[in-house]
Image (cartoon, coloured by chain):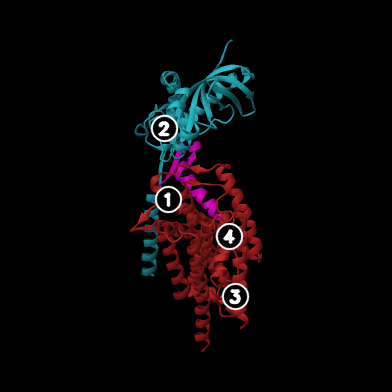
Chain colours: A cyan, B red
Amino acid sequence: MTRKIVKYLLLVLVIGLLAYNSVYIKKLSEVQTKEQTAFDAASFAEKLWVTKLPATLDSAVTLDVLRSTIKTNPGYAFDTWFNSMSIGNVRYGLVKLTGKVLAVNEDDITVLAGSAADPLTVKITTEYVYGNAIRDASRLLDIRDFVNTTDLNNVSEELNKLVRKRVLPAFKEQVRKSDSITCTGAIELNRAHIERSRMNGLSDLEIIPVQCKIIQQ
Amino acid sequence: MIAIQKNNTINLARLQSLIALVTLCAIIAILSDKFLTMDNGWNVLRQIAVNVCISVGMTLIVLTAGIDLSVGSVLALCGAITAGLLKNGIKMPSADLFIGFTILGALLAGIIAGALLGWFNGFVITKFKVPPFVATLAMLTIARGLTMLWTQGHPISNLGPAFSVIGTGWFLGIPVPVWIAGMVVLIASFITRQTRLGRYIYAIGGNENAAILSGISINKVKLIVYSIAGALAAVGGIMVTSRLDSAQPNAGTGYELDAIAAVVIGGTSLSGGKGSIGGTVMGAVIIGVLNNGLVLLNVSPFWQQVVKGAVILIAVIIDKGGKKK
């Protein structure tokens, strides 16, 4: 009988200890207040968009300069104008171009850029704006300022949202074939393919736009 | 004499699996220089660990002449429960109460949920005499639906670095999932070889009527076995969730087939009463190596399924051939 009591007492003790270390109870209102004061990626992205991004866009390298530098010194171009906040060969950079619209497609527009002697066809994405291209290309964030990668990635998503809401709808509505446009956006470059880029020049370029304007003739 | 013969049969079955494994490794090593590298070895072991946990539970069930088709869905649901409780806790607005879960609490909740789902399988099978195939097939759908309800169809991600240790961490130079699978195997081997429960499991699978006449409470044993299998599926679910740092609503799809394959290849008889945990581990390793080899050799995913199915078929045919002799 005593053995049985001790057995059950021990069992209750173990269960009690496990339960004590398993759950904690708080007031829901306190938790919700704390959640509200957590990092607000939308506000952060908005502030970035208004205060810092315009200057960065102004200082973006032009497509012509980038192309000539890629041919002569691809390593320099990659290290100077391209950036990534994650590991790997892929980096993103901001590039500015002026060109003539060749076609307006469902998901993108095709633009003829470059000089008459050395033309280049590029695509400007107008539908699918995802990933970290704009965030990384802008070089405005420092990974050490963020306590976790979720917050950092949320900033990316908010920047992409701003492009989808504020840039693309108006641009898509107005842009027509044969329009002259100027556009600044993010492009991707892979270190592993940089030698091929040096030999053949930049090809199959796809730009994720941040700022697009139709030049009035 | 009979005992010696039985031991010889088990040893022969194990030897067959071992020869199959060594041959498989040799072929893949010849065809791919990446196969025999340390990184790949650890990677294979890490992937096998989840299947080992599920397969061990499946072995216990198959030994009783049962089957559990719900382990993949139970794995997903328990992974999602663990992730959900860890990340969001339980909110009770009417009482202004928030119940938060520590990692220990979330793990326990996930494992208990798995055990309860397994217990429910056992309950339906023993109480209503529903064939295990049908009862667990129903649970497969129920658990998958509950997972969708719990997650609202979205992954539950960003569970924190401490939780990730379970699926991606290392301890004494060995991946944590391998430690967990190793412990599961040791405990299950001990249960099947050294305890009364283990003897009852073999007895029920060998001859259920004889087991009843011997005074074994077969319903109780089956309830325990299905609960253990559910809990082990939950352990697998936790490992998968931790490795991905995310509970995916469609996780574990088809895992039941890999588990059954491991059990069959390991020499456990689908009619119950014969087999071992060691054999199942061997079966899981063969399946894992086969999966890895097919990927390394760039075999199309469609062909991978064909090859896996063929290997299971060959294993069963060899098993049948051995029994005839």
Let me know if marks 1 and 2 both belong to one chain. Answer: no
Whether pointer 4 and pointer 1 mark residues with C-beta atoms closer than 8 Å, the reply is no
Q: Secondary structure at mark 2?
A: helix
**What x and y, as percent, mark residue B227?**
53, 62
Kindly report the distance in space between the C-alpha atoms of the residues bearing marks 1 and 3.
43 Å
Tell me the number on the disc at residue A74.
Answer: 2
> Marks 2 and 3: which is nearer the front?
2
Measured along the vertical axis of the image, is residue A206 above or below residue B214? above
Magenta region: B74-102
Displayed quadrant of residue A212: top right
Q: Which residue is mark 3?
A: B319
Kindly report the distance in space between the C-alpha atoms of the residues bearing marks 4 and 1.
27 Å
Front position in the image: B118 or A6: B118
**What x and y, as percent, mark residue A107?**
62, 29
Give the amino acid at mark 2.
Pro
State whether the magenta stretch is mostly helix, strand or loop.
Answer: helix
**Chain to which the residue tagged by mark 1 belongs:** B
Whether pointer 1 and pointer 2 mark residues with C-beta atoms closer than 8 Å, the reply is no
Q: Residue furthest bottom?
A: B1
Front position in the image: A22 or B17: B17
Whether pointer 4 and pointer 3 mark residues with C-beta atoms closer than 8 Å, the reply is no
Give the amino acid at mark 1.
Gly
Give the amino acid at mark 4.
Glu
Q: Which residue is mark 4?
A: B256
**Chain to which the residue tagged by mark 4 belongs:** B
Q: Secondary structure at mark 3?
A: helix
Circle 1 Cα neighbour tier, 10 Å, few/some/many (<14 / 14–19 / ≥20): many
Does residue B184 appear to the left or right of A100 in the view shown?
Answer: left
Q: Secondary structure at mark 4?
A: helix
Whether pointer 2 and pointer 4 mark residues with C-beta atoms closer than 8 Å, the reply is no
Tell me the number on the disc at residue B105.
Answer: 1
